[in-house]
Amino acid sequence: MAATGEEAAAMDSISRVPPAHPTVLSLGGSSETRGEPGETAADGQVVPAAPKKPTSSSDGGVETAEEAVEPDINELCTDMFDKMAVFLQGELTGTCEDYRLLENMNKLTSLKYMEMKDISINISRNLQDLNLKYASLQPYLEQINQIEEQVSSLEQAAYKLDTYSKKLEAKFKKLEKR
């Protein structure tokens, strides 16, 4: 949406205002005041004078750069560093907790694998025992197979004998009838 009329004039007046002088930060952490604008400070630098606020009847309620209140930069920096410290502390705490959780999970996994190793060793031992027992039973199993073959041959012989005896009985009955 484009600005019209008084709003456009207010925006135009804001863009023509000379930029404010940057505030000099004291890196030593002292909170001494720099003095009044135009005076010479203790370190020999002249404190810049703040530009005068132009009065205009067509500002339309728009705040200019000179009207904006400059907050104390030291307080803002201290607040920012405090909040950043809290944030980083939280991040590091979360990371430490994650690593503790991973460590606990690794310990539990290691214990589970040790249990599985013990179980597999027991299964291997039992399988060897079963293989030895099967090997010791193998001659008996072969004897059982031989006996089964003999029984099946005897069964076939019994069927043949039964059929022969039935034929013989039939012949005998025929002879008897004559």
Image (cartoon, rainbow, N blue to C red):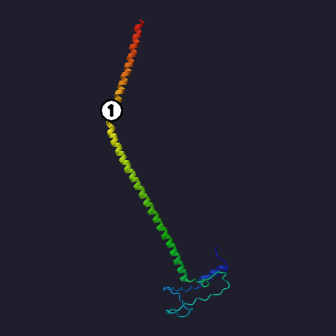
Task: Label 1, secondary structure: give it.
Answer: helix
Whether residue 144 sits left or right of residue 23 in the image: it is left
173 or 143, which lies in front? Answer: 143
Q: Is residue 116 above or below residue 16?
A: above
Query: In the image as oriented, which residue stretches furthest toward the top?
Result: 178
Whether residue 49 sits left or right of residue 135 in the image: it is right
Q: Circle 1: is it few (<14), some (14-19), or many (20+) Cα within 10 Å?
A: few
Screen quadrant of the N terminus: bottom right
Whether residue 152 sits left or right of residue 36 in the image: it is left
Q: Is residue 136 above or below residue 114?
A: above
Residue wearing tag 1: 143
- Residue 178 x/y as whole percent: 41, 5
Residue at (47%, 63%) from the top-left corner?
A: 101
The quarter holding residue 160 reads top left
- Residue 81 x/y as whole percent: 51, 78
Amino acid, disc 1: Gln
- Residue 138 x/y as whole percent: 32, 37
Residue at (36%, 43%) from the top-left corner?
A: 130
